[in-house]
Image: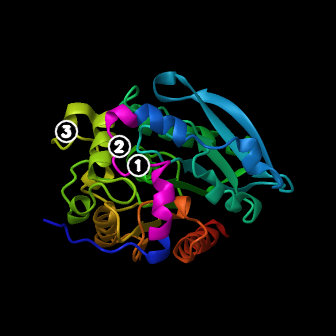
Amino acid sequence: MTTARPDFDPELKAGLAVVGGVFPPTITPDLIAFMRRSYASPPIEDTLRGRPIARHEETIAGHGGDPITVSVLRPTAASGPRPGVLFVHSGGLMFGDRFSGADLVLDWVDRLGAVLVAVEYRLAPEFPDPYPREDVYAACEWAATHAERLGIRRDRFLVAGASSGGGLAAGLALAARDRGGPRLCGQVLDYPMLDDRGTTPSTGQFDGVGVWDRVSNETGWTALLGAARGGPDVSPYAAPARATDLGRLPPAFIDVGAAEIFRDEAIAYADGIWAAGGDAELHVWSGGFHAFDIFAPHTVLARGMIGTRDAWVEKVLAD
C-alpha cells in the first residue's frame, strides 16, 4: 500500500539525490558516527572568509558546571551595544556542531549588525536529556549576564534554531519564562523538532523518503530520552509539544515544509501559541522537504523561505 503524501517541489526533488549522499533519509543508531563526519560544518575560517565578521571563543559553564564552548561573532565595524542572537544548531540532537547551518544566519551579523552567540551543546546519546537543553539555557544566561561586555542589547536578544535546534530554542523560551530567566524578544523556530511521540499524520507520511524520516526521528528522540520517549514523564523543555501552557512567550517565527514530518507539530505549536493569546508567524512551504533551505539554498522556494525569515528577524531586532 502506498502512503499518500504531498509531492516535493520539482526543483527541490531534483536536488534530493545529491542530499542523500550526505544525509540519508533513514538514520539508525549505527549511522550516528557516519552522520557526525558527513554533517560536520566546514572550517569556520572558510565560511567567514571575506565577510566583515570578527569571532572569538569562550569557555563557559554548561549543565552541571561542566565546560562548554561558545563562539561570539560580531560585525567588525560595529560599535556600541548591538542586537543579539543565540544560535542553536541542527543535527537531530545527535550530530552537528555550533557552526552547522550558521552560514544562513551570518547575514544577521554582517547585514543586520547583530552579535551572534553559537553554543556547542553536548550531544545525545552520550549526553542525554537534560544535557543539550540545559547547555543551551546556560549559554543564554551567560550571554545575558555578560551582555555589556559582549556588546549585546538585553532588550533585543532572541534565540534561533533549526530542526533539533528549533526544538531546543522553543524549550529555552519555555524555561526562560518559567524560571524568570533572560527576557527574549523573539524565537525563530525553523522546522522545529518538538514532539517525541510521533503520532501526527505527517510523521507517518514520510518513511524512507526526503530528509529525516519517521525512523530517523525515533532514533533522535530515543538517543535523547531513552525509554522515556513517548511516555508520560517527558519534560516540555525537552519536547515543547508537551507544554500545556504556551502563553507569555516571546513572539515566534515558525516555518516548515509541507512535505516533511515536522509539518503538523509545527502547525500545532503555532496554533497553541495563538490559542494562548500569543504572537506567532507561521509559514508552511508547499513541496518543501526537511531543511531544504540548508540543502538547496539556491532554489526559488529556499530563497523565498530565507528572505521571509530574514525580514521577520530584521523587524524584531529593530528598535
Q: Which residue is mark 2?
A: 27
Give the number of the mark in front: 3 or 2.
2
How far apart, in angstroms, are the residues tagged by discs 1 and 2?
A: 7 Å
Sequence order check, earlier mark of 3 and 2: 2
Give the number of the mark in front: 1 or 3.
1
Q: Looking at this view, is 138 or 110 the one in front?
A: 110
Q: Is residue 43 visible?
A: yes
Secondary element at image label 3: loop
- Region rendered in magenta: 13-31
Q: Looking at this view, is 128 or 174 the one in front?
A: 128
Q: Quick check: 147 left or right of 39?
A: right
Q: Quadrant of residue 272?
A: bottom left
On screen, 93 above or below 259?
above
Q: Which mark is residue 24?
A: 1
How far apart, in angstroms, are the residues tagged by discs 3 and 2?
A: 25 Å
- Quarter the N terminus occupies: bottom left
Q: Amino acid type of disc 3? A: Asp
On screen, 284 above or below 27?
below
Residue lying at 46% horizontally and 45% vertically, measured from the top left: 91
Q: Which mark is residue 316?
A: none
Q: Where's residue 302, x and y in %?
A: 54, 71
How far apart, in angstroms, are the residues tagged by discs 1 and 3?
A: 31 Å
Q: Which residue is mark 3?
A: 233
Secondary element at image label 1: loop
Q: Quick check: 160 left or right of 280?
A: right
Does the magenta run of residues contain 15? yes
Q: Where's residue 131, x and y in %?
A: 42, 31
Q: Amino acid type of disc 1? A: Pro
Q: Amino acid type of disc 2? A: Ile
Residue lying at 67% horizontally and 39% vertically, measured from the top left: 71
